[in-house]
Structure formats: C-alpha cells, structure tokens
Amino acid sequence: MFIEVYEVDDVRLTILKTNPLTLRITATGLVPTSGYTDPELAGWIYIHPPKDGIYSFEFIARAPSGPFNPALLPITAIQH
C-alpha cells in the first residue's frame, strides 16, 4: 500500500538539456519507520490544465509490509 511521505523537506527543479527540454523534479523527505520502498511523485490527473498553471504531485512510498524500526528516515523520489 502506498501512503504519503510523513514530511517533505526539499523540492528541486532541474531543466534537462534534452530535445525537447525535460523537467526533473527531485523531492526529499522523511518517513516514520524503516522499510519504506518505491518512493515516487505521483502526478494528479487533470481533466483541464490547472488555471494557475501549477501541477500538483503527491510524494508517496510503499509502506513496510513486515517488521520495521520506528525512526524518522530520509527518502528521495525523482520524477522526469
């Protein structure tokens, strides 16, 4: 099961010099326990582009399915 990351600490945008240009989004944050996997930035699906031009993402990761240790741990996701 994917759930939202506990805390988002940083988001960075990088324009990649590809043809056409590509935007890379890198987010770092914290999860509340060990064992989280498959971090991703899940883009919202829009029927019409947002009026303000700002697209939203959810920073999610797969929750542990077995034993875990309670501790705030860093996690990173990259979206191209």
Image (spheres, helix red, strand yellow):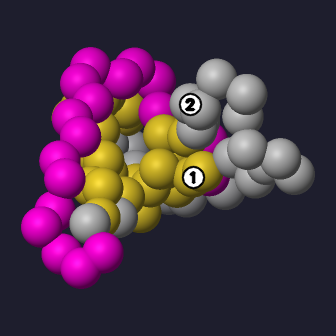
State if disc 2 and disc 1 touch (CB < 8 Å). no
- The residue closer to the viewer here, 28 or 11, is 11
Percent x, y of residue 22: 29, 64
Badge number at residue 17: none
Question: Image point 19% across, 53% down: which residue?
Answer: 15
**Quadrant holding the C terminus:** bottom left
Percent x, y of residue 36: 40, 50
Q: Residues within 10 Å of mark 2 (few under 14, many from 20)?
A: few
- The residue closer to the viewer here, 13 or 20, is 20
Residue type for callout 1: Ala
Outermost residue toward the right? Answer: 47
Q: Mark 1 = which residue?
A: 42
Confirm whether residue 52 shows in the render.
Answer: yes
Q: CA distance from mark 1 to mark 2?
A: 14 Å
Residue type for callout 2: Ile
| 16 shown above or below 36 | below
Residue 25 relative to residue 32: left or right: left
- The residue closer to the viewer here, 33 or 44, is 44
- Decide whether the magenta segment is chiefly helix, strand or loop: strand
Label 1, secondary structure: give it: strand
Question: Image point 24% across, 24% down: which residue?
Answer: 10
Percent x, y of residue 59: 48, 40
**Quadrant holding the N terminus:** bottom right
Outermost residue toward the left? Answer: 17
Label 2, secondary structure: give it: loop
* Residue 38 sits inside the magenta stretch: no
Which region shows up in magenta?
2-20
Q: Mark 2 = which residue?
A: 54
